[in-house]
Image (spheres, rainbow, N blue to C red):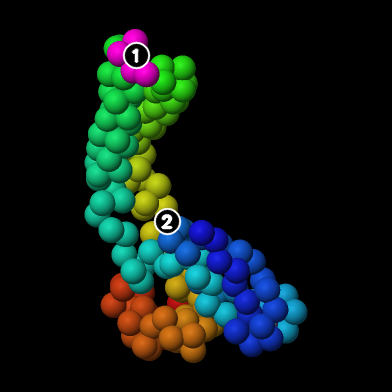
Amino acid sequence: MSASFKCPNCSRKLFSYEPGAQKYGSMVGMCKYCNSKYLDPRYKEAAITGIPKRELGYVGAVVLLLFGGFMAWRGYSVLSNIDSYFDADMLRVRSWVFVILGILFVVAGLIEAIFVVTGLKKKKMEKIMAESVNRLKNESYVWDLVKLGVINNPEAVRNATGYSANNRM
Ligand SMILES: [Zn+2]
């Protein structure tokens, strides 16, 4: 279910988004109509929230493998004695859909597992974290986050990133 985001200042619609699906990125946007800054609900800062361990581990891969495997097995077990069903034609189509989707999920799970094993996943997360720390080196960005209520004070940034926003390098 997508939601539409309106500017908190001028109430004009800026974009639609999926409330559940969050990406890592700059949390501050600027309204193209009234130039006021707003908190972008699509993004979170990795250096502030941290990256949950499960995003680095095998959980995603295991879920995909189990789910896909179960779907494919369900489809296959119906297909293997399709003649015992009354509405065989309808069931045959549906079962093939189950088998094919299940296999696709299994393949996605294997790819995800390869990403974890080879360390590519970790590398990607490290890049996301480095980008986040870089954004937080920008003092005006940090103050925007304070004003928008994401962090209490710039000191919180130092705690989260090891970088002090008060230090001008
Ligand atoms: Zn606006």
Work out how far the residue at label 2 is from the one at label 1, CA to CA, in angstroms: 49 Å
Relative to residue 62, is residue 134 depicted above or below? Answer: below
Q: Which of 49/3 is in front? A: 3
Q: Which mark is residue 128?
A: 2
Counting every numbered tag in the picture gives 2
Residues in magenta, as a range: 82-86
Helix or strand or loop: what does disc 2 sit on?
Answer: helix
What's the residue type where badge 2 is placed?
Ile
Q: Is mark 2 within 8 Å of ligand 1?
A: no
Q: Which of 6/97 is in front? A: 97
Q: Is residue 103 visible?
A: no
Identified at 26% across, 51% down, the residue is 54
What's the residue type where badge 1 is placed?
Ile
Q: Nearer the viewer, mark 2 or mark 1?
A: 1
Instruction: Estimate the x, y position of residue 53 in percent, counting from the top left.
Output: 24, 54
Q: Which mark is residue 148?
A: none
Q: Is residue 5 magenta?
A: no
Instruction: Estimate the x, y position of residue 38 in percent, counting from the top left.
Output: 57, 80
Instruction: Estimate the x, y position of residue 26 in percent, counting from the top left.
Output: 52, 68
Q: Quadrant of residue 82?
A: top left
The residue that mark 1 highlights is 82
